[in-house]
Image (spheres, grey):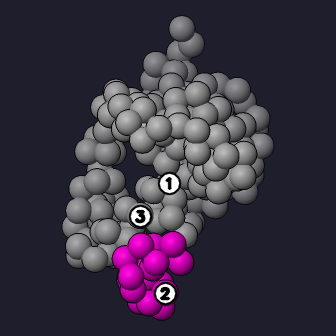
Amino acid sequence: MDAITDTVISEKEIVRLLREKNEKAVRYLYDHYSKALLGLVFRIVPNQEIAEEILQETFVKIWVNASSYDETKGKLYTWMLNIARNLAIDKIRSSEYKQSSKTQTIEKSVDSINKNYQAGFNPDTMDIKALTDKLRPEQKELIDLIYFSGYTQAEAADKLKMPLGTVKTRVRSAIGELRTYFRNTD
């Protein structure tokens, strides 16, 4: 076992190591964050094999793009979550995924989600669920659809039968409130 993965390292130090292309930094991030990232990906792409592939793509992208991380715009963990989320959303929007999803039954999907969701993702331990629960119900519903379920704003507007402008305004407002919550947790 490597000593770096057994200890707690500051975010600043992890970023420095990543930018220096030190493999220990990626190992540390994987050991400490892979379960949470996989849980997020799995909520969007409820297929274990595909979710694991996306997780690998996430860590490759973190490694390759470490120099583009800007600590003034947010925490490293949030940046990593966004990479994982965007890759997962890209996957479910791909024609290849849409075609393969048509062959999977609803029952199989629900069983798969229930089994893997309970094992791999616990938003309570990440405080994300607690933060989104503070939002007004109409904001929370939109954040859940757009951020966790991969809907576009237009798709969410159609699903909820509301004007696109209202969706955009509520999402913008919710993100502003979440930023305030995140700043207050520092």
* Label 3 to label 2: alpha-carbon separation: 14 Å
Q: Residues within 10 Å of mark 3 (few under 14, many from 20)?
A: some
| N-term-proximal mark, 3 vs 2 | 3
Residue for point 70% across, 26% down: 23
Q: Which residues are magenta?
A: 154-171
Which residue in the structure is indicated by mark 3? Answer: 145
* Label 2 to label 1: alpha-carbon separation: 26 Å
- Determine which quarter of the picture holds residue 61: top right
Q: Disc 2 on helix, strand or loop?
A: helix
| Residue 176 in view of the camera | no
Q: Amino acid at mark 3?
A: Leu
Q: Is residue 27 above or below residue 57?
A: above
- In the picture, the disc for residue 23 is none
| N-term-proximal mark, 3 vs 1 | 1
Q: Residues within 10 Å of mark 2 (few under 14, many from 20)?
A: some
Which residue in the structure is indicated by mark 1? Answer: 78
User: Which corner quadrant holds the N terminus?
Assistant: top right
Which residue in the structure is indicated by mark 2? Answer: 164
Q: Main secondary structure of the magenta part?
A: helix
Which residue is nearer to you in this view: 14 or 82? 82
Q: Position of residue 179 (x, y in %)?
A: 40, 70
Q: Amino acid at mark 1?
A: Thr
Q: Position of residue 82 (x, y in %)?
A: 56, 55
Q: Nearer the viewer, mark 2 or mark 1?
A: 2
